[in-house]
Amino acid sequence: MLPRIFDLLRADSVVTALLGTSPMRCYRHGAAPQNVAAPYVTEFVVTAQPANDLSGLPPVDTCRLQVSCWSVNAGTGATGINAIASAVRAAIEARWHIDDVRDMGQDAETMRFRVDFDVTVFDHSPP
């Protein structure tokens, strides 16, 4: 029912080199641990709409995700927001559609830099 964005990212060696593997620093929105080490990624399911079918179960769900990349570094080095966002974007675009990219700048509370992606996923395996 909900896309497995973290499985997609976990399968990409460039992303795991940046975000680690045990554990991989990917969290649902609002679930990142306090003071988590950056860089990391969060995701939020904005909508999940089944394509209802009168003859049976929905054959596909259309989901819209917001994927946020976070870093303490604005630069382009290995932990820079540009490197993180580029790697995550490449992993996502290999399979799904990115509809929007937003440079959110530096968060006033956490002082971390953020880039958001809106991702459309056609999930052909709903429940």
Image (spheres, rainbow, N blue to C red):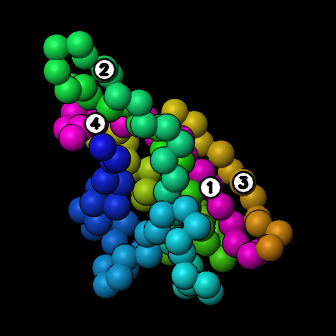
39 w.r.t. 102: above or below: below
Horizontally, residue 67 falls left or right of residue 17, namely: right
Q: Quadrant of the N terminus?
A: top left
- Viewer-closest of 48 and 37: 48
- The residue to which callout 4 is attached is 123
Name the element at disc 4.
strand
- The residue to which callout 3 is attached is 104
Q: Quadrant of residue 37?
A: bottom right
Q: What amino acid is labelled 1 in the image? A: Val
Q: Magenta region: which residues?
A: 110-127
At 60% from the left edge and 51% from the top edge, which residue is drawn? 116
Q: Quadrant of residue 120?
A: top left
Name the element at disc 2.
loop
Q: Are marks 3 and 1 in contact (CB under 8 Å)?
A: yes
Tell me the CA gap for discs 3 and 4. Answer: 28 Å
Q: Are marks 2 and 1 in contact (CB under 8 Å)?
A: no
Q: Which mark is residue 52?
A: 2
Q: Residues within 10 Å of mark 4 (few under 14, many from 20)?
A: some
Q: What amino acid is labelled 2 in the image? A: Asn
- The residue to which callout 1 is attached is 115
Q: Are marks 3 and 2 in contact (CB under 8 Å)?
A: no
- Viewer-closest of 115 and 32: 32
Q: What amino acid is labelled 3 in the image? A: Met
Q: Residues within 10 Å of mark 2 (few under 14, many from 20)?
A: few
At 54% from the left edge and 75% from the top edge, which residue is drawn? 32
Front position among marks 2 and 1: 2
